Image (cartoon, rainbow, N blue to C red):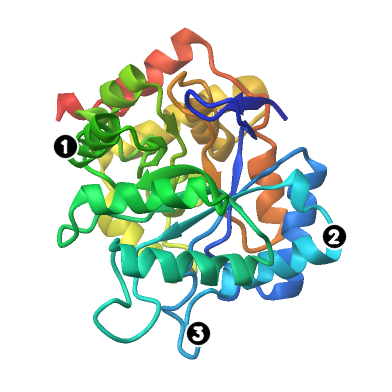
């Protein structure tokens, strides 16, 4: 596994990050531990979670993923080898300060995440999405205080539009505060415009690490969905059909299949290789419900596309042409 610096920091992370949204939801604790074990054996060290995972499941208050990771690290005694990235913003308790990016919410939320993770520090603490009701200066000062207190080592953000990220960077620079070193965007071959329209140039200019989520387009870029075939038996199948089905995207899948075949890989590995071959990208986040699912993503480790292959895929998925 290749290791890359996270943005302009000296922190080295694996070329694939392990997403853990499934833990405590579609992957039970035993399976989650096996997935993390396999990830580490393959050389992975960046594990991404969030405090709200998985509070959308009946009976789950949130924090289930963090708790599972915490118990795994304690059992394996490997905390020093793992780069833990978690997030703050969503509703975690009742009341007016139960969600958001206010000082009141962040200070309580970070301590609860530390408790669940059974650690004294979070390597990368990320604001999950922006909070229009809280001044950016308040959020950035609070995050800076967490770094000074030793509870957090680096800060990042997720789902930030470019203008909001610029204001946050400017505020940190103006007041001499710690600044965001990474961004988690929704980015894949079938969903390029959101990131590329403005944000790609911004992160390149300021040396911000990029940790894309949904690199497989929710499953569309795995090879399960093909032209003329019936939908697979999946809870997400209809949503994927409505979002991605169309002549242009089926032509993209066929182009990916052709490129993959030349390297002995499938569509899934080509989707990850396209991101891994982009110099802006630090580490795509791959999720898994089973060890077998993870192994399919790990097969992309070290796989890079040529400039000609990148151009073919860029042309097939060019959002500017639509």
Looking at the picture, how far across and down is residue 101, in whole percent? 30, 61
Q: Which residue is mark 1?
A: 163
Q: Residue at x 15, y 62 (%)?
A: 133
Please tell me whether mark 2 or mark 3 is closer to you in this view: 2
C-alpha distance separating marks 2 and 3: 25 Å
- Residue 101, placed above or below residue 43: below
Q: Quadrant of the C terminus?
A: top left
Q: Residue at x 48, y 27 (%)?
A: 7
Q: Quadrant of the N terminus?
A: top right
C-alpha distance separating marks 1 and 2: 42 Å
Pointers 1 and 3 in contact (C-beta within 8 Å): no
> Viewer-proximal residue, 298 or 145?
145
Q: Is residue 217 visible?
A: no
Looking at the picture, how far across and down is residue 88, in whole percent? 41, 61
Looking at the picture, how far across and down is residue 148, in whole percent? 50, 46
Q: Which residue is mark 3?
A: 60
- Residue 16, placed above or below residue 293: above
Q: Which residue is mark 2?
A: 76
Sooner in the amino-acid sequence: mark 2 or mark 3: 3
Q: SS class of the residue under badge 1? A: helix
- Count of picture labels: 3
Q: Is residue 46 visible?
A: yes
Q: Residue furthest bottom?
A: 59
Sooner in the amino-acid sequence: mark 1 or mark 3: 3
- Residue 6, placed above or below residue 53: above
CA neighbours of label 1 inside 10 A, class few (<14), some (14 to 19), many (20+): few
Q: SS class of the residue under badge 2? A: helix
Relative horizontal placement of residue 169, taking residue 77 as reference (left or right):
left
> Viewer-proximal residue, 99 or 294?
99
Sooner in the amino-acid sequence: mark 1 or mark 2: 2
Q: Quadrant of residue 71?
A: bottom right
CA neighbours of label 2 inside 10 A, class few (<14), some (14 to 19), many (20+): few
């Amino acid at each position: 596994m290749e290791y890359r610096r996270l943005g302009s920091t000296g922190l080295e992370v694996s070329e694939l990050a392990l997403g853990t949204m499934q833990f405590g939801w579609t992957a039970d604790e035993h399976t989650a531990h096996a997935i993390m074990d396999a990830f580490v054996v393959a050389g992975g060290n960046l594990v991404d979670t969030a405090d709200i995972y998985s509070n959308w499941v009946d009976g789950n208050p949130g924090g289930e993923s963090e708790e599972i990771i915490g118990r795994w690290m304690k059992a394996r005694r490997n905390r020093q080898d793992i780069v833990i990235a978690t997030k703050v913003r969503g509703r975690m308790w009742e009341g007016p300060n139960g969600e958001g990016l206010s000082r009141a919410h962040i200070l309580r939320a970070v301590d609860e995440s530390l408790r669940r993770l059974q650690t004294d520090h979070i390597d990368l603490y990320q604001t999950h999405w922006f909070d229009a009701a809280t001044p950016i200066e308040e959020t950035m000062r609070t995050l800076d205080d967490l770094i000074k207190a030793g509870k957090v080592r680096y800060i990042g953000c997720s789902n930030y539009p470019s203008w909001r990220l610029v204001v946050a960077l400017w505020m940190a620079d103006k007041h001499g505060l710690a600044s965001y070193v990474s961004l988690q965007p929704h980015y894949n071959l079938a969903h390029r415009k959101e990131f590329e329209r403005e944000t790609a140039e911004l992160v390149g200019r300021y040396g911000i690490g990029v940790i894309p989520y949904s690199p497989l387009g929710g499953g569309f870029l795995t090879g399960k969905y093909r032209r003329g075939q019936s939908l697979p038996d999946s809870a997400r199948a209809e949503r994927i059909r409505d979002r991605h089905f169309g002549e242009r995207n089926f032509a993209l899948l066929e182009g990916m299949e052709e490129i993959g075949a030349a390297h002995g890989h499938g569509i899934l590995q080509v989707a990850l290789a396209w991101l891994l071959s982009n110099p802006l990208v630090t580490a795509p986040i791959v999720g898994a419900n089973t060890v077998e699912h993870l192994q399919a993503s790990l097969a992309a480790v070290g796989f890079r596309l040529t400039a000609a292959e990148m151009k073919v895929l860029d042309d097939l998925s060019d959002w500017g042409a639509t």
